[in-house]
Amino acid sequence: MAKPYSRDLRERLVGGVEAGASRHEVARTFKVSPSCVIKLLQQWKATGDCGPRGFGGHKRYALAGHEAETRALVAAHPDLTVTELWHEIRTRGIKAGRSSVGRFLQHLELTYKKNTVRHRTTAAGRSGRSRRMASGANKP
């Protein structure tokens, strides 16, 4: 995984531009991308600091504040797909993406799995064997 540039390098980049060199010249000198220098200078002018910003961490779930309502929806309709549940959540005025709903359900361990009562889908009137074997067409 990538790591932020060191504070020393960042200070040298800012110092180079402050000394009068262009952002692109400084980028070539220190072998970094011009966008890195441009963004670093924007941060420097906005905050007065050129240190790295927060890196990594955990983002809260979009539905974290609506856990009880989500659990109630799943309990009332346990066979809804993620997309159907997402549409139901949106009709209630809660803003969340479809993939956020899926991740939140996994977090709550409310995933839907087929069980032995629900059989796999098959064509009507077909056995598990192929048509040729079922009709006896393989006989010599």
Image (spheres, rainbow, N blue to C red):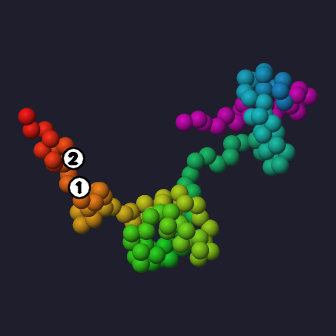
User: Compared with residue 104, is residue 34 higher up or lower down, i.e. above or below?
Assistant: above
The answer to whether residue 69 is seen in the rendering is yes
Tell me how far mark 2 sits from mark 1, CA to CA.
8 Å
Residue 91 placement (x, y as % from top left):
59, 74
Crowd class of label 2 (few under 14; some 14 to 19; many from 20; radius 10 Å): few
> For residue 52, which quarter of the picture?
top right
User: Compared with residue 39, is residue 111 higher up or lower down, i.e. above or below?
Assistant: below
In the displayed structure, does residue 121 sit left or right of residue 89?
left
Residue plotted at (58% across, 61% down):
97
Q: Which mark is residue 126?
A: 1
Residue plotted at (27% across, 65% down):
118
Residue 130 within the segment the image draws in magenta: no
Magenta span: 1-22
Tell whether label 1 touches label 2 (CB within 8 Å): yes
Residue plotted at (88% across, 33% down):
18
User: Compared with residue 3, is residue 106 higher up or lower down, i.e. above or below?
Assistant: below
